[in-house]
Amino acid sequence: MKTRITELLNIQHPIIQGGMHYVGFAELASAVSNAGGLGIITGLTQKTPKDLAKEIARCHEMTDKPFGVNLTFLPTVAAPDYPGYIDAIIDGGIKIVETAGRNPQPYMEQLKKADIKVIHKCTSVRHSLKAEAIGCDAVSVDGFECGGHPGEDDMPNMILLPRAAEELKIPFVASGGMADARSLVASLAMGADGMNMGTRFMATKEAPCHERVKEAIINATELDTRLVMRPLRNTERVLNNSAVEKLLEKEKELGSNIKFEDIMDEVAGVYPKVMLDGEMEAGAWSCGMVVGLINDIPSCKELIDGIMSEADSLITKRLEGMLSA
């Protein structure tokens, strides 16, 4: 399948594995890229730029296909060494960066000088247009269904994707609620050039997260995610557990007086405990509503091959069949 995104990124299939904290290691990124998609290493999971350089080198040993690095720009007082991370990306020969969080404009010059393609994650049309204006090569348009931070507009992809298609000139991929061939074909129909999957790639053989995480995803339904940190305007979609229930109780009790410090126990330092150690009640961890569509743990190749084969069948048989009926 050829789309503007496969052409831009020089990949076989229009499927991107989004950056995920303590999941986006070389094992997963290389497996996705080897299967014809675009694998992505999560930059800030690596504690220093030097660590990121090592992870990039490790991934190069596992694949000769293109892969990218995710850099999330956080609204923190003590910001990570972003120029150092970008140097590690450039020195590692990476040509694709997925940016998320705050506006990447301060770092665009450094990235573009190195001829790096930048895909920015956006949860609204206005942010997507801003990304286009500052020189991003593509955007990942994140609907309300997504795991992690869906923004504050609560806009699902059935509306968001066609609106993005009406406004944007640069290519974009659909993100949030993406799991299978149906997701891909629907996204293409609404104007996207491919799809970005996060939660779905966590439930694959190569995903280096704990088996209990994969089991939790398979056993969950579409009703099992919760939105936390809404009063702080830092909404995050997470899988429900006892820590999330406690966090929501605190939000209810404290109302508009709540501060980030009040919920530190439930949200800080959670990812290594959950993803690596399998402590499923340790805190709130990002997960999309798409868990309701995930029922198996295939290899990345099985997953991507299956999606592409079924997408072909959906388009050429189901949809074309309706036209000729």
Image (cartoon, rainbow, N blue to C red):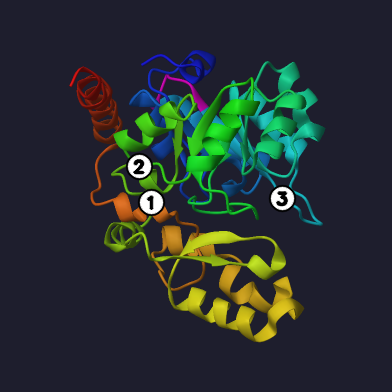
Sequence-first disc among 2 and 1: 2
- Identify the mark at residue 290; answer none if there is no mark: 1
Q: In screen coordinates, is 108 left or right of 185?
A: right
Write down the region rendered in magenta.
62-67
The residue to which callout 2 is attached is: 179
Secondary-structure class at tag 1? helix
Closer-to-camera residue (27/135): 135
Q: Is residue 55 visible?
A: no
Position in image of residue 169 (x %, y %): 64, 20
Q: Which quadrant holds residue 140?
A: top right
Asked if the residue at tag 1 contacts the one at tag 2, i.e. Cβ–Cβ closer than 8 Å, the answer is yes
Indicate whether 283 appears above or below 40.
below
Closer-to-camera residue (180/105): 180
Position in image of residue 45 (x %, y %): 57, 48
Sequence-first disc among 2 and 3: 3
Sequence-first disc among 1 and 3: 3
The residue to which callout 3 is attached is: 74
